[in-house]
Amino acid sequence: MEVFVKKVTVSLSSLVLLSVIWVGKPLRAQEIPGEYQPVLTITGKSGDYKANVLKVNVARNDLHVTANKLALPTPFGFGGWFAMTKGDGGDDVMMGDLVLLQEEVNPVMSALLDNGLEITALHNHLFWEDPRIYYMHVHGHGRPADLAKQIKPALDLIGKGASSQPAAKPASSPVTTLDTANIAKIVGHEGEQSGAVYKITIGRDDIKLKDMGATINARMGLNTWAAFYGNNDNAAIAGDIAMLEKEVTPTLKALRSHGLDVVAIHQHMLSTQPTVIFLHYWGQGKADDLANGFKAALDQLGH
């Protein structure tokens, strides 16, 4: 759940084909409330406040990742994050998705557990990537400053061993040659440009999800997204699809019928009702074909 998030909230300037899933105007950043300012100070991270959610970036700009020998930029799916929003009794619910090298997984997990936080998922997003990357979902409940102190020891462990990874050349193209207007037309949703990556993110506001009284919205991780990179004739796509249980099989069929690879199926959250399943996928080919495959999967949602 890249998901998102400096560039995880999608801009929608018009009605979209999947209005049952989410329709809205671009979210504008609000002034960060005073009680959240210490979170940024304690963790030493940057973030923003929209839709009643503080979202803090934990991007892995130190990583040089390839997948199937294709060098990928950080916005393609290596932007970790954690977010907070108000729940019951004035406390906040915190959820996050941390991007980790395999040697970082267990030290970070121990740091989170030792400081009173929960691990709700651990999984991959890609096949054939080098170095191996894992995604760890974290959950907590409490006062914002206390949650920041709880997650800080884990954050301090991230990136310390990155120098031992293979020295792959990072993808550094600052612009894209993709026809993003056509991708948005095919998908029915506009996206946002981050360097050479075009990312479309769609919330599931049709799913009314609560956790300890907190509304779990797109910025808290309840979203579907697709990241596009490359050019019109040779592009890559990766992303995450949030599904109800009944939507899983139709979505799988839609992706596979369009030649997209499914790389993971799992939950991100525990003890929520209804149960939400997340699916990660990957593909390479013509940008239009990849967009049509993503659109076919979207058409299975929200019915």
Image (cartoon, helix red, strand yellow):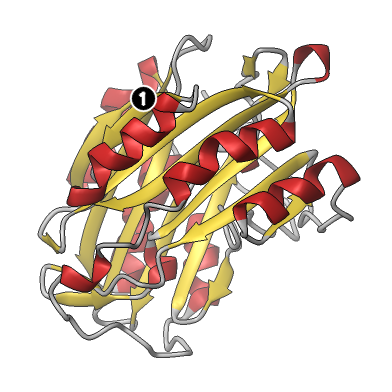
In this view, 29 is above or below 180: above
Looking at the rendered image, the quarter that the N terminus falls into is: top left
Instruction: Find residue 83 and report its horizontal and vertical position in percent.
Output: 62, 41
Q: Is residue 259 left or right of residue 75?
A: left
Residue 181: name its quadrant.
Answer: bottom right
User: Looking at the picture, how far across and down is residue 201, in whole percent?
Assistant: 55, 52
Residue 299: x and y, percent?
44, 38
Taking depth in this image into account, of 188 and 272 the one nearest to the observer is 272
Q: Is residue 72 above or below residue 269?
A: below
Q: Residues within 10 Å of mark 1 (few under 14, many from 20)?
A: some
Q: Return the x and y of residue 155 as percentages of the image width and height.
A: 46, 50
Say which residue label 1 marks: 267
Compared with 137, 247 (above or below) is: above
User: What residue is shown at x 78% (from left), y 54% (from top)?
Assistant: 27
Q: Is residue 300 visible in the rendered structure shown here?
A: no
284 and 112: which one is in front? Answer: 112
Q: How many marks?
A: 1
Side of 10 where 101 appears, left or right: left
Q: Kindly identify the amino acid type of the residue bearing the numbered disc 1.
A: Gln
Query: Residue at left 34%, top 41%?
Result: 108
| Residue sitting at x 11%, y 68% | 68
Can residue 191 be seen? yes
Compare residues 220 and 98 and report the one nearer the observer: 98
User: From the viewer's perspective, is residue 92 above or below residue 259?
Assistant: above
Q: Quadrant of residue 245?
A: top left
The answer to which image quadrant residue 190 occupies is bottom right
Residue at image x 66%, y 12%?
212
Query: What is the secondary structure assignment of the residue under circle 1?
Result: loop
